[in-house]
Image (spheres, grey):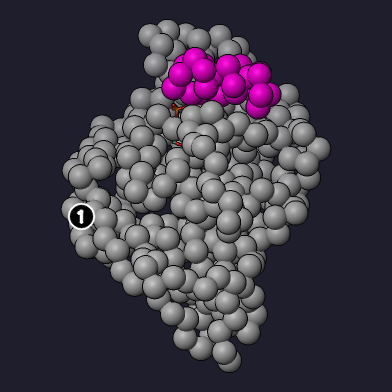
């Protein structure tokens, strides 16, 4: 079939890309990335060309960057999920102008065969949410509470990294099923947002010296469910406050990226005395429930019961610095890079970095 096109590209248009330059030892630095430009590719039969609008920044990229035995090599394009718009199509099922969730990686333009692509309807929810609370991070938070943590009404559910897309979903789902969510976050501003906007009963700043005592005060009957995004010392502190038959959802290990060699782990002895269970969560096991997440949480967003926040950085060239900020824990909300405007012909709006609440 002949290509259908939304936009006639100019001869000077180029495709800007961000590559892995070298493996980081510990937290990534901007020098671990390199930039290049290539020609914009032309779709062949059964392919479409899409421009990147939002690039998702996700902590697991750090695993890919650090792993010496992994498939991501220095010189490779940084991989990543994107919300993109189709510009030219020779694919029978996709039309120019459609918004899709795809994996363009850290570049402005990419081809796709349609495999693994999800069509997005901007009328249902802001398209950026497909990378956050209505995407994989939201699904991890939702599945971890609904299928693993299974809190009963009135039970105390503690969530670390409480204001990010995973944590804000876990905390709000816990609240909406009748449990009492208590957040853990790294600044007083995040803690205030967690209580005032997300509806946590309390939120404790783990960087304060009295963190352990404050957590015990906020959870006087012990912790029934812990949704762990962090590991390390925060996990150790929480384990000392478990209620009998507590459930622990191991979702993320933000604390582990500081070093390439394993950090000393917490003592697991309290799990024994509390007869607790600890379960690993891999979101891939719940992909068939994504439509449930979109329906249930999408309706809560529309009715105003569920809030979220995005931390948007403008410009693909700023993706490395924004990713390093995420890995230092300095993001506030779902970390996104706006690579292009949502609508062609409209300039990208000013950065909402650090204050992009919706
Ligand atoms: N298991 C799965 O299938 C699955 C799927 C998706 C995501 N995840 C994991 O879920 C976790 C949360 O992901 P997200 O996308 O929602 O991220 P996020 O919350 O937007 O960002 C990570 C947050 O971790 C917190 N943090 C705590 N200790 C930290 C430390 N030592 N260093 C850096 N940050 C620290 C920071 O918030 P505070 O300042 O509030 O502490 C930081 O903002 C990640 O570990 C991710 O890998 C797992």
Q: Camera-side residue: 86 or 330? A: 86
Give percent across and percent down for residue 269: 39, 28
Which residue position holds label 1? Answer: 21
- 259 is higher (above) or lower (below) than 34: above
Q: Residue furthest right?
A: 303
Viewer can see residue 164: no
Q: Residue furthest bottom?
A: 1
- Residue at point 71%, 35% (across, down): 306
Drawn side of residue 303 relative to residue 293, left or right: right
Viewer can see residue 304: yes
Drawn side of residue 357 relative to residue 210, left or right: right
Drawn side of residue 75 relative to residue 137, left or right: left
Q: Assess mark 1: CB under 8 A from ligand 1?
A: no
The quarter of the picture where the C terminus appears is top right
Give percent across and percent down for residue 68: 20, 57
SS for dot 1: loop
Quarter-of-image position of residue 318: top left
């Amino acid at each position: 079939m002949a290509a259908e096109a939304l936009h006639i590209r100019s001869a000077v248009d180029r495709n800007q890309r961000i590559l892995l330059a070298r493996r980081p030892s510990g937290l990534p630095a901007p020098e671990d990335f390199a930039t290049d430009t290539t020609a914009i590719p032309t779709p062949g039969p059964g392919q479409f060309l899409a421009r990147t609008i939002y690039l998702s920044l996700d902590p697991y990229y750090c695993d890919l960057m650090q792993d010496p035995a992994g498939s991501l090599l220095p010189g490779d394009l940084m991989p990543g999920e994107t919300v993109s718009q189709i510009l030219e199509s020779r694919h029978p099922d996709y039309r120019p102008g459609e918004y899709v969730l795809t994996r363009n990686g850290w570049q402005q333009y990419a081809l796709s065969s349609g495999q693994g692509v999800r069509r997005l309807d901007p009328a249902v929810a802001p398209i950026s949410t497909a990378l956050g609370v209505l995407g994989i991070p939201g699904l991890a938070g939702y599945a971890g509470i609904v299928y693993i943590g299974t809190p009963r009404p009135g039970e105390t559910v503690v969530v670390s990294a409480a204001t990010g897309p995973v944590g804000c979903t876990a905390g709000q789902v816990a609240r909406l099923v009748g449990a009492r969510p208590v957040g853990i976050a790294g600044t007083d501003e995040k803690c205030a947002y967690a209580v005032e906007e997300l509806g946590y009963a309390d939120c404790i700043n783990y960087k304060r010296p009295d963190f352990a005592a404050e957590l015990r005060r906020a959870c006087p009957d012990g912790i029934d469910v812990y949704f762990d995004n962090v590991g390390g010392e925060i996990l150790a502190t929480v384990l000392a406050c478990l209620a009998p038959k507590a459930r622990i959802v191991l979702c993320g290990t933000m604390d582990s990226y500081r070093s390439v060699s394993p950090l000393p782990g917490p003592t697991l002895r309290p799990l024994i005395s509390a007869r607790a269970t600890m379960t690993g969560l891999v979101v891939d096991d719940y992909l068939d429930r994504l439509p449930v997440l979109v329906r249930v949480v999408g309706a809560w967003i529309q009715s105003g019961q569920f809030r979220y926040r995005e931390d948007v950085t403008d410009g693909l060239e700023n993706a490395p610095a924004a990713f390093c900020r995420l890995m230092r824990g300095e993001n506030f909300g779902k970390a996104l890079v706006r690579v292009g405007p949502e609508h062609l012909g409209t300039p990208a709006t000013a950065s909402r970095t650090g204050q992009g609440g919706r």
